[in-house]
Amino acid sequence: MKRPEPEMDASRFVVMADYIPSIVQEIRYYSTYNFIGDRIDGYEEPIALCTLDCARALKDVAAELLVLGYRLKVFDAYRPKTAVKHFVLWGIEDTDQRMKQYFYPDIDKTDTFKLGYIASRSSHSRGSTVDLSLLNMDTGHEVDMGSPFDLFGEISHPSYTAITDEQYRMRMLLRNSMMRAGFVPYECEWWHFTLADEPYPDTYFEFPVTRSSLRA
């Protein structure tokens, strides 16, 4: 049987929730509640996919945090190149700013790439980067991290301290747990982590976000 092209080969990817049953999923780019306001190209099912290596490391994080009363909540994981292209085309179209008040109220849309909030080539496409937060098992609600997911601004930087002590403590709880499991944080987004020893550091995948991609 002929092997697929490297960029379409999902043989080492898994459905994150199958591997980590406790994880909560809110796949924003499958919905219309994101910084563009439309479902993003390439997101054909509301599921998180990632490499097996990433899932194994996340499973350790999930187990550690469960003991403390928290579950991981994932917003995005593997992101196909078609989705990144959608982001880039949106960035070029300067008239579409309908979601500005929710996701980039204090910066110009044209600066989202320069400031590091959107990339023309995303680590997510390599399959071992995740965007996530915490859910408090006692309250059943997402933890207040001081800014919501995908809010483009200085307040979302992990190092930002003009938030409450509790909000900062929650950011550091997530950050330290992820780092102990081998993930590297991103300086512009408290929710963004990449597995340091990622299996495909040079491959940017293109298969769609759907369970059937893993069976191709």
Image (spheres, rainbow, N blue to C red):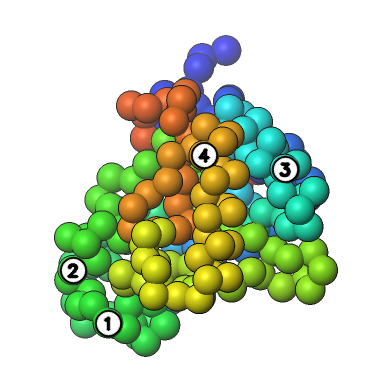
Residue 101: x and y in percent read 37, 87
Q: CA distance from mark 3 to mark 4?
A: 12 Å
CB of mark 3 within 8 Å of CB of mark 2? no
Q: Secondary structure at mark 2?
A: helix
Asked if residue 97 lies left or right of residue 14, the reply is: left
Asked if residue 135 lies left or right of residue 84, the reply is: right
First-in-chain label (1 vs 4): 1
- Please state which amino acid type lies under the numbered disc 3: Glu
- Please state which amino acid type lies under the numbered disc 1: Asp
Q: Comparing marks 2 and 1, which lies closer to the viewer? A: 1
> Where 95 sits versus 30, above or below?
below
First-in-chain label (1 vs 3): 3
Q: Which residue is the extreme one toward the top? A: 1
Name the residue beneath numbered marker 3. 64
**Residue at x-position 69% and y-position 36%:** 60
Question: Residue 106 shows which numbered tag?
Answer: 1
**Residue at x-position 24% and y-position 66%:** 112
- Please state which amino acid type lies under the numbered disc 4: Met
Name the residue beneath numbered marker 2. 111
Q: CA distance from mark 1 to mark 3?
A: 36 Å
Q: CA distance from mark 1 to mark 4?
A: 30 Å
